[in-house]
Amino acid sequence: MPTHPSRPSARPLTGFAALALALGLMAGMPVHAETPTAEDWAGLPADWRPAGLSRTLGFEMTSKNTGQRYRILVGLPHRAPLPSGYPTLWMLDGLASYPIAEYVRPRPVSAGQSAQWVAKKLKDTPAGLVIGVGYASGDPFDVNARALDYTPVPAGRTGDQFSSEHGGAAAFLKFLTEELRPLIARYFPMNPRQHSLFGFSYGGLFAVHTLLTEPGHFQRYWAASPSLWFGERQLLRQLPERLETLRFEQPTRLMITVGLDEQYPASFLSEEQKRHMQERAIVDLVRDAARRLEAARLPNLQVTARVVPEQDHLDMLMHGARRVVEKFAFTP
């Protein structure tokens, strides 16, 4: 069974032609969800079947750069692209983040949604492509795989309590930009000036690291609760040196968010939790990173930081995965 479609000789297709081709190529690809067996539904109603996400295709591929096997979700746009191509949102931890984005992603008006306001909203909503990048293990958060892929080479104690695998960010960026992006581009034209990257926790660290090291691959970055404590706060320690050479050839936006309860909750569950939060000091680190990037006044870089009250770490995944679709990735 092939893991990717054969290369077409024609230029990328648009609209319903792209949809038809994409649906056709799925016949040779693994599905994006674990397939339940008869044992899983023994005793349940006979008409119950495995469920999938609407207007979403999926496939798996193994990266030659990382050696990891990924499960990719492709959210089909609700209409044909503009001549410039689709603005494209790349979502890390895709098996966790993409389903949250799914319920706010625009989709064609159905027969039961003929109201004029629905049609007008869709007409005014830019068509965009959403790509969820997850792991073939099927875990929403594959602890070791993401710890390896999303972190730079450690420049100090990692501070990671769950995994000892780190330092693969450079290889993972090559997978995203040199393997996965060209594959998707065979079938869906993408706007080269509007690629957005969404990452949460270690994924947010990857987003900030990419912005500071190879910013040209994306023009919009949403870093939700980035793990800036990693490697004894190495990204912030390295920031002065990075700022000396950091340049942005295109207008670039960084949204960096954190929940206030990640460091300053109304109360702590235990002294151990209090010590852990104070050591990581994620709210302070996010504020410091944003302040220093803004103070640098780098041409073409717009930085926005938000500390969201009454939100903890996992809350910020849900906060960001929704808003990056509605208010960030696809706006002009």
Image (cartoon, grey):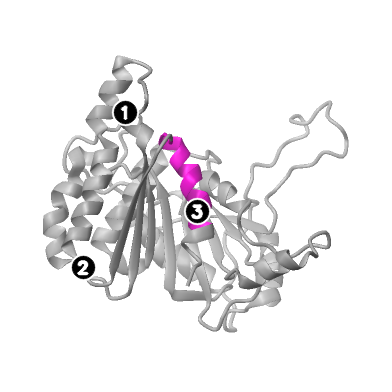
Which residue is the site of mark 2? 298
Circle 2/circle 3 CB separation < 8 Å: no
Q: Earlier in the sequence, mark 1 or mark 3?
A: 1
Give the structural element (helix, strand or loop) at label 2. Answer: loop
Give the structural element (helix, strand or loop) at label 3. Answer: helix
Q: Quadrant of the N terminus?
A: bottom right
Q: Is residue 298 above or below residue 165?
A: below
> Foreground mark, 1 or 2?
2
Q: Which of marks 2 and 3 is nearer the N terminus?
A: 2
Which residue is the site of mark 3? 323
Give residue 158's position: percent from left, percent from top: 24, 36
Q: Which residue is drawn at 43% across and 67% down?
A: 195
Which residue is the site of mark 1? 161
Q: Does residue 154 appear in the picture of this structure?
A: yes
Give residue 11's position: percent from left, percent from top: 57, 83
Q: Is residue 224 left or right of residue 288?
A: right
Give residue 193's position: percent from left, percent from top: 41, 75
* Amino acid bearing label 1: Gln
* Amino acid bearing label 2: Leu
Which stretch did the figure color magenta? 311-325
Q: Which residue is drawn at 23% across and 72% down?
A: 299
Q: In this view, does 174 lie above or below 98?
A: below
Q: Which residue is drawn at 59% across and 59% down?
A: 74
Q: Is residue 47 left or right of residue 75?
A: right
107 in magenta: no
